[in-house]
Amino acid sequence: MRIQKYISLTGYCSRRMTDKLIKEKRLTINGAAAVHNSEIYEGDEVLIDGCPIPEKGMPVYLALNKPPGITCTAQPDVLGNIIDFVSYPERVFPVGRLDKTSEGLILLTNDGDIVNKMMRSEHNHSKEYIVTVDKPVTENFLSRMAAGVEILGTVTKPCETSLISEYVFRIVLTQGLNRQIRRMSKELGYRVVRLRRVRIMNIKLGELQSGQYRHLKSDELEKLKELLG
């Protein structure tokens, strides 16, 4: 199998992170530096930084209420990275991203397979956000956000929007462009003051306090895997 899939199945890191390890020449196969899409065969010795890949432990699935200021990266040299912040006793990594200035629900796991399934945009997984802006929300603004806004050289997919209060609205997206909600709002003349993710597919933030994490419940995990196919 390809090196990216092999590493992700060990639970060490995601395929995207594996590509980074390859570029940094930290990954070797039988003593030779791995390259993009290297093939792994039975009996091959795969090392990271000259060491064997740690054996995969029990699967871990966490829901974290990320506070603002934490960066969603596993890179240890990034100050305020999410791994150091969570300080979980086993190696986990974040599923996707949430802007440094944003807050709310993000999942962390050591299950590379589930990460890869969730990262595939073609599955159109829904994510719900509560957004506070700098001026009153109008019906025109909500309808234009829902219809799609031109950003980053494309038009965003249609989405769901609804009014919560004068300056606050709810939006449900099925795509994850870079700083999408902030860019959409800016294009329509609004500035996002606070952005909080409250749901990823069937996983809800609920009453989880800022900076705290919890393990996914068995029924949540079962439903999540069902939705992922």
Image (cartoon, grey):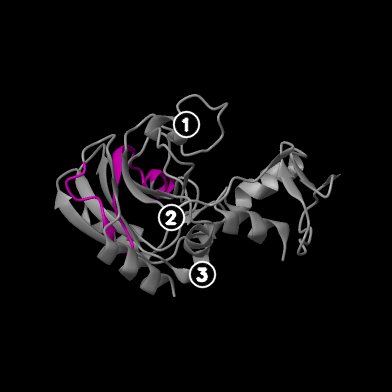
Residue beneath disc 2: 59
Label 3 and label 1: CA atoms lie apart by: 28 Å
Residue plotted at (35% across, 66% down)? 224
Whole-percent x, y for residue 32 in the image: 86, 46
* Alpha carbon distance from label 3 to label 2: 25 Å
Q: Earlier in the sequence, mark 3 or mark 1?
A: 1
Q: Which residue is mark 3?
A: 122
Dot placed on the residue nearer the N-terminal end, 3 or 2: 2
- Residue 76: x and y in percent read 55, 29
The span picked out in magenta is 182-208
Task: Give residue 215's position: percent from left, percent from top.
Answer: 30, 50
Q: Quadrant of residue 219?
A: bottom left
| Residue at the image point whose x is 71% and y is 36% from the top | 49
Please tell me in which quadrant of the rendered image residue 202 appears. bottom left
Instruction: Answer yes or no: is residue 137 visible.
Output: no
Residue annotated with mark 1: 81
Going from the N terminus, do you reach mark 1 or mark 2 first? 2
Task: Determine the secondary structure under disc 1.
Answer: loop
Residue pushed farthest right? 32
Q: Please give left or right for residue 42 compared with residue 108 in the image.
A: right
Of residues 150 and 104, the one drawn nearer to the viewer in this rendering: 104
The amino acid beneath tag 2 is Pro
Q: Label 3 amino acid?
A: Glu
207 versus 113 height, above or below:
above
Q: Is residue 222 magenta?
A: no
Q: Residue at x 73, y 44 (%)?
A: 47
